[in-house]
Structures are given as C-alpha cells and as structure tokens.
Image (tube, coloured by chain):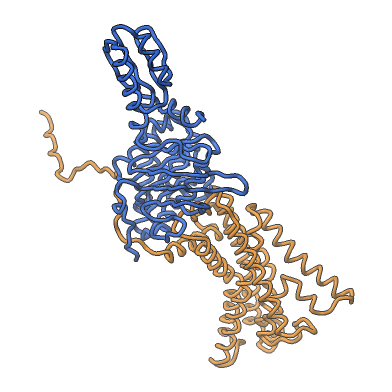
Chain colours: A orange, B blue
Amino acid sequence: MTAPTPAPSSDAEIFDRGYRSYDGPRNGVGTGMFSVFLASVQRALGLRRKFRFKVVPLATIFIAYVPALVFMGVAVLLPSEFADEVVADYAGYFGLLSIAVILFTAFVVPEVLSTDRSSGLFGMYMASPLNRGHYLAAKFGSLVSLMFLVTLFPVLFLLVGYVVNDIGPDGFMNTMEVFGKIAVSGLLMSVYFALLGMAASTMTTRKGFASAGIVMLLIGSGVFSGVLVESGDAPEWVSLLGLASLPFDVITRIFDEPLDQIEGVGTLASVGAWAGVCAICAAIVAIGYKRLEVTK
Amino acid sequence: MNTAAVEVAASPSSVISAVAVSKSWGTHQVFSDLTAEVPRGVTGLLGSNGSGKTTFLGMLLGLHHPDGGELRILGEDPANAGPDLRQHIGYSPEHHDLPNDVAAQDLVRHIAQIHGLPRREATTRSSDALWLVGLGEERARPVGTMSTGQRQRVKLAQAIAHGPSIVLLDEPTDGLDPVQRDDMLALIRRIGTEFDIDVVLSSHLLEEVERIADNVVIVADGTVRASGPISDLRSGRGGVIVQLADRSADVAAALRSAGLVVDEQRDRLVVGTTEPAEELVDAVRDAVASVQAPLRRLYAVEQSLEELFLTEVYTP
C-alpha cells in the first residue's frame, strides 16, 4: 500500500526577484547628504567594520572620558572642600582633552576624507545628484559631530558628574550659564580641528601622510612658537602660532580664566587668530576640491 | 520628497545628443567636433585607448564641462542640470577601486540613497540588484575580498539599483575572463532590452559591442567617425558584388574609369570599399548599361564592425 501523495499547496509559487523599475518618490539632495553624513560617522567609528578599525576611535574616546570619571570619583571620595582643590575646572578639562583631540583629528579626519578619493568613491558621489558643495558640507557636518565626542560631550559629562556630586554650579541659572560656555567652547574646538584636519586631508589621498602631517603640524607649531617665545626674542602673540593650543586659549577667555591665557594677547587677537586659522583651512579645502579633477 | 521626473519621452528617439562639442585638457584637444545622436537601446561607444571615451562619459555626467558645443542627455544639459537629472542616471566607473572594507550591500544601498531612494526602498532594491548580478549570496562580503569580476558586478548593481533611465558603463568587461565577460555582456543586454533602461557602454573591444549593442558611436581624433544603428552602418559599407554572364573586363574598365576600385575575381567583380551601397549600385547599373553586359546578380556586402572601425578610424 502506498502512502497518499500530498496535494500540491495552492500557496506554492516560483519567486523571481527580477528587476522592477522605480517610479516612486525620490528624496532631495538633503537626504543624500544625510546618507553621506551617516556613512562618514560609521566609517570614522569603525561601525560595520572589523574590530581593528574601531580601536583608534574607541581609544581616543576612552582617553577623553577617563579623567572625568577620575575627577568624579575624587569628588565622591573626598570631602567637598578638598575635592574643589583637586578636580579640574571646565576650561582646564578642555586642556586635558588635547591629546585625545589631536589623536582623533590625526586618525579620524583622514579616514573620512582621504579614503573617498583613494577608493574612487568621491567620483561616484560626483556622478550622483550631489555636487562638491553638498559633499563637503556633509563631511564637515559629520566631522564636527564626531569631534563633539572628544570635545563637547566629555566636558558635559563632567558637568553632569559635578552637579550630581554637588560640586557643580549653584542654581539652575548658573548651571545653564556653564552649560552655554561649554557648548560654545565645544563647538569652537570641534569646528577648528575639523577644518584643520580637512585641510591636511585635502592635500593627499594617503591617509598615513595626512595623519603624520596633522600630528607634525599641531605639535611642531607649538614647539616652534614656544621656542621663539621662550628665547625672549619674539613677542607674546607668537604663542598664537601654536595651532594645538590656540583654541584652548580662546576657551580660557570664554570661561574667564586669566591665569591660563597667553600673556600680552587680547581676547580679540585670540579669537581673530582662531577665526583666521579656520578661514585659511576652509579656503584650502574649498580651493583644493574646486580644482580636483574627477579622474576615476 | 521630490517627485519630478526627467521626461525621457520628451525626446523619444534620442537619449543623448551632441552637437559640435569640443573639449581640451590643457593643450591636448580631446574633442574638436563631437556630433552624434544616441538613440534608445544599447549603444556602444567605441574608440581606441585614449580616444576620449571616459571624458565623453564624464561630460554626460556633468563632471567635466565642454569647452564649446551643445550636449544633452535625457533632453537636459548635464553641465547645468540639477539633481533631478542625475537621479535618473546610473554610472559604473572604469576603475576597480571601491571602499574595500564596506559590504557590497551597504555600498549599493548607500549609492541608491544618495540618488534619492528612501531607505527602505534602497535596502530592498540593493539586495535585488545584487541578486540580479549574481552576488546575492555574497552581498554581505566586503568589496575588498571580492575578485575583479565580482567588483565589476557590484559596480553594475550600484548603477541600476536606484532605477535609472539610462546607465553609463565605462569598460564594464575590463579585467574579466572570457566566461565572466560572456555573463556580463548577457546581463548588460538584458538590462537594455528587458528592463527598459537605455545603456551606453564604452569599450575598445569591437566584438563585444557588436554582440550586444544596437547602436554604435565611433570616436577617433576628436570627432565622431561614424554613429547610428550597427545594422545600418554595416550594410552597404563593404562594397557591392557584381556577377555577369559575359564582358566582365569591359564593365570593370568602365567602373575604374568612373573612379571606383574594382577587384576582378574568378566569377565576379567586387566594386568599391567604403562608398555607400546606393552610389555603387547606381555606378554599376550605369557601367553595365554602357557596355550592354548581361547581368546575373548584384548585391551589397555587409561589413563587419571591425572592418567598419578600421575603415573609419584609420582611413584619413
């Protein structure tokens, strides 16, 4: 006796994926820019990539937040009168972030910008609805946002920790005032280092060269201006040529910390130097990309 | 949401139009007078290496601006057209460099999104496009781990995933072995015939263009040497054959006196080489009539694309 043959299912069908033309709505350029923004952030942080691509961004972010955790621990463990003396203030914490910021600028910005040119992706972007302006705006936005991870957010984290541990600003208005100063400082620093990294990355398609160039520029300019001023032959304003320390000088003025400011240099000169460096870097990027021929 | 679509139907018979287009790189003139109409269907852009094929595609994409003349794609000037035009153009570059550590599906989806597709559509269509080019099982693999053939397929997938009206393929079979080349050509032919997408592919390989293209544009020395449907170009460009019952020598002499090249073979005359067939037929008719020769047969020879190319490119 044979088993009955099962009746064919009426739901069975041959599924051919085929190709469908697309006549639906299309988003504008803004959505395309946002897609570039997101892809850049993912790339910089090593998301959807192998673990080795996550090491540098995670390490720099770690370096940026660890001191804040230490200061919070000190604030919890020590009586407030001692803790006030030991823990860093907000402007001082921006200064502590310099190593993390330099590393982040040197390794993350070229990853976001130079790679597109070496991999030919830039040419594919330019063959899309995006133009150079859209592309650079999306990249700049992504880099400033990424910079917030090692500039703005660690100090905001510190503020929250201090407030929770009762060594923060007194009252809501004072807290908001400090919050505002931190936000402006974080923005100034992020814009500055993003533009500086973009300018260096515009000059080469090799990530390694761009990274080395950024480190040498930031550290070398500080050593150079420091030697000139220390030797006593140069005026004090030469200290503004130290590209790594320049934004921190502006921040000390935002927080009104006269002891940490460059002597003999006014706030206008300091802010002017910051704006000048930003403008020069922006011009290098704009001219570099305007002249860039899409050859592949 | 931008629903404005470029109306291909505005110019139903021609997707690309170039009139006296000129372009130089520094002192090197790439095009001096590029004039051509590219009809719908699959079109091969033929030329030797360095003849300016990639520059022409770059101008169609708006990446390079012509120095002079008028260029249109889908009825619009690519140098001044906005995003609405480029949303409807797919492009596969010649180079094989792609972001090595990005998964194929992520790359294709990303390119679809910047061409205006909503994220969900971009995700679905990028997967479909990769299945279509035979990389469905490999879609999660980083592009850097793929062979040249697979990279060519990824480039093709990203060119069609966003539903373009036209795709520009720059040397799409470069670096492929014969089997991969056959598969790729079959796929391109399918795109041009079944999917209602017009295709322009640049190549210096005549055989592959002859196999899949309906039309051809041959560029050399800064100008278009020939363009149009391949069948039209081939027919009537290889001379005519004349078979006579008698007086072949007299007819040959009459044709030579009319300035035509005549090859006297055993039982026939091969007349002309590059002249249009209609002119040759008229000349043979006159010669046969003048010597009262008994004509048995008269027909045009179809020229191969290779012969056509060599004639157009290398004949001064």
- Residue B82 lies, in percent from the top left, at 42, 61
* Corner quadrant of residue A291: bottom right
Compared to A159, does B310 lie above or below? above
Q: Is residue A174 left or right of residue B87?
A: right
* Corner quadrant of residue B286: top left
Question: Of B98 and B47, which appears nearest the observer?
Answer: B47
Compared to B13, does B184 lie above or below? above
* Corner quadrant of residue A240: bottom right
Say if residue B299 shows up in the picture: yes
- Which part of the image, by quadrant, shows the N terminus of chain A? top left
Q: How many marks?
A: 0
- Residue A13 lies, in percent from the top left, at 20, 43
Q: Residue at x 44, y 62 (%)?
A: A32
Question: Of A173 and B263, which appears nearest the observer?
Answer: B263
- Residue A40 lies, in percent from the top left, at 52, 60
Q: Residue at x 49, y 46 (%)?
A: B142
- Residue A125 lies, in percent from the top left, at 49, 55
